[in-house]
Amino acid sequence: MRKPFNLANALAGHAVVNGYGVAVEQFAYFPSNTSPYKIYALVRDTEGDSVETYTEDGKYCVSDASTNSDLYMLVPDPKPEPRKVYVNVWRNDDVFGVIHATVHHTSEQAAAERTTSCSGKKKVFIGQKTFEY
């Protein structure tokens, strides 16, 4: 995700990319330059690094038309919320050595299952484990 270029943030070291998604870094700003291209920056391309020039608003070309070489601030993707599952582990006393597990998406569901009978089977609760992924 990206947002419009901000010179102060770029000079402060915030992540910048061009319209192709290529990292642009090591900004040098020359406000007294008489050219409209007052920014010099290193473009980290897979085909080789290059130093390019930009206007103060991050444009590669002076014209108002946007190009994929224009600069943008990179906005990191938000971290997804960790997901949890609750696993009840059971031993079946009717069949020797049989252990099985049931998976639930809430702790309430897992707890409710532990209090429910199993229609005549000798199901013995062993424990619960929570997994985050």
Image: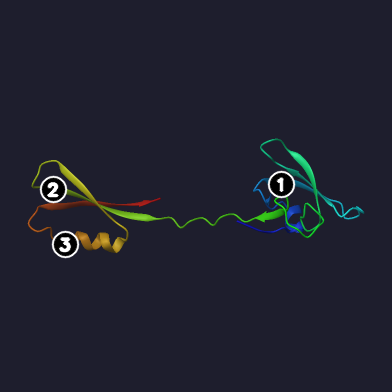
**Earlier along the polypeptide chain: callout 1 or callout 3?**
1
Task: Count residues near mark 2 (Cα–Cα under 10 Å), then give few for <14, some for 14-19, many for 20+.
Answer: some
Q: From the image, which quarter does the N terminus lie in?
A: bottom right
- Quarter of the image holding residue 32? bottom right
For the point 78% across and 60% down, the residue is 64
The dot on residue 116 is 3
Q: Amino acid at mark 2?
A: Asn
The dot on residue 24 is 1
Q: Amino acid at mark 1?
A: Val
For the point 27% across and 62% down, the residue is 109
Across and down, in percent, residue 30 comes to 87, 52
Across and down, in percent, residue 70 comes to 73, 53
For the point 13% across and 60% down, the residue is 117
**Is mark 2 in CB contact (under 8 Å) with mark 1?**
no
The dot on residue 35 is none
The residue at which mark 2 appears reads as 92
